[in-house]
Image (tube, rainbow, N blue to C red):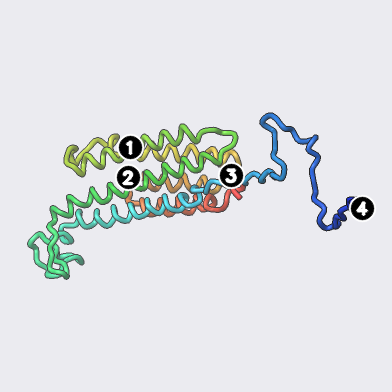
């Protein structure tokens, strides 16, 4: 009986099947920096950019103020003109003087209803316009780099919105009389206007708003404040003055 000696044959490894192995000695095996073999660190996600709401609000806020001015103008004409309320004017259909306005659908609107609804509707649009300008102040305050007046201006405008809303709710619910002191009625809008003026002045000083636009905004604010019925015109001037702010900000990609 013969014994056969078995010789191990070397196993050939194909070059394409070579397994790439990292140097395990260079990898830490303990501690927080230990990385398992074959795990690649995922790239960090790019920081998300917040939307620039100032571009939209610079257009929406003056537009809401313009709507408020139109409502004040129209409702003021309707309530101040006895002929329009009684039906003898353009709103009337039958031309009688019964103190009501006849509509095409057969419903009638009493003059007292118009006088009661006019302040409520115009006051609501004023509250919406004040809230839009307050939000605009908060959005534009984030664009400032050196003059940090965004937070105090926003707080001032927010207090003005609260005062405006309180007066409107008081008059709409009947808790406050129809005739109020002028300081109480215009106090809220004035505070909002001061907040807007502070932010626009800071943007102008930092070169983010043209001087001509700031001057036009001042003219628009003066037209709104004058008791000459120029509220729609002042709102349009503000819309034109704030047009440069509707463009993309250089700080926002």
Residue bearing mark 1: 162
Out of 174 and 230, give the one closest to the viewer: 174
Q: Position of residue 12 (x, y in %)?
A: 87, 55
Residue 110 is marked as: none
- Would residue 234 appear left or right of 39 to someone viewing this image? left
Q: Position of residue 204 (x, y in %)?
A: 56, 41
Q: Which of the 4 image quadrants contains residue 156?
A: top left
User: Mark 2 or mark 3, which has the lower sequence index?
Assistant: 2
Q: Position of residue 127 (x, y in %)?
A: 32, 45
User: Mark 4 or mark 3, which has the lower sequence index?
Assistant: 4
Residue at the (47%, 47%) spot, across then down:
217
User: Mark 1 or mark 3, which has the lower sequence index?
Assistant: 1
Q: Nearer the viewer, mark 4 or mark 2?
A: 4
Assign a secondary structure to mark 4.
Answer: loop
Task: Give the farthest residue toward the left.
Answer: 98
Residue at the (76%, 36%) spot, across then down:
27
Q: Are circles 1 and 3 on residues that touch, CB within 8 Å?
A: no
Residue 96 higher or lower than 247, as above or below:
below
Residue 148 higher or lower than 224, as above or below:
above
Residue bearing mark 2: 127
Residue 74 higher or lower than 200, as above or below:
below
Mark 1 neighbour density, 10 Å: few (under 14) some (14–19) many (20 or more): some
User: Mark 4 or mark 2, which has the lower sequence index?
Assistant: 4
Residue at the (36%, 47%) spot, across then down:
129
Residue 2 is marked as: 4
Out of 161 and 122, give the one closest to the viewer: 161
């Amino acid at each position: 009986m013969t014994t056969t000696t078995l010789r191990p044959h070397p196993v050939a490894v194909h070059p394409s099947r070579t397994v790439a192995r990292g140097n395990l000695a260079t990898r830490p095996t303990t501690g927080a920096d230990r990385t398992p073999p074959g795990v690649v660190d995922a790239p960090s996600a790019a920081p998300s950019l917040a939307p620039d709401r100032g571009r939209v609000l610079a257009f929406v806020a003056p537009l809401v103020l313009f709507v408020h001015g139109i409502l004040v103008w129209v409702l003021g004409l309707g309530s101040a003109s006895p002929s329009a309320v009684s039906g003898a004017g353009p709103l009337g259909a039958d031309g009688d003087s019964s103190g009501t306005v006849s509509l095409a659908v057969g419903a009638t609107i009493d003059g007292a209803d118009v006088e009661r609804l006019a302040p409520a509707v115009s006051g609501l649009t004023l509250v919406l316009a004040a809230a839009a300008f307050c939000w605009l102040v908060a959005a534009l305050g984030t664009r400032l780099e050196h003059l940090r007046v965004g937070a105090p201006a926003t707080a001032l405008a927010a207090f003005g919105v609260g005062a405006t809303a309180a007066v409107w709710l008081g008059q709409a619910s009947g808790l406050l009389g129809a005739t109020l002191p002028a300081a109480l009625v215009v106090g809220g809008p004035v505070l909002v206007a001061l907040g807007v003026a502070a932010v626009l002045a800071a943007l102008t000083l930092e070169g983010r708003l043209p001087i001509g636009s700031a001057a036009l905004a001042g003219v628009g604010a003066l037209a709104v404040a004058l008791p000459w019925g120029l509220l729609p015109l002042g709102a349009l001037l503000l819309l034109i003055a704030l047009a440069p702010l509707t463009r993309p900000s250089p700080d926002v990609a």
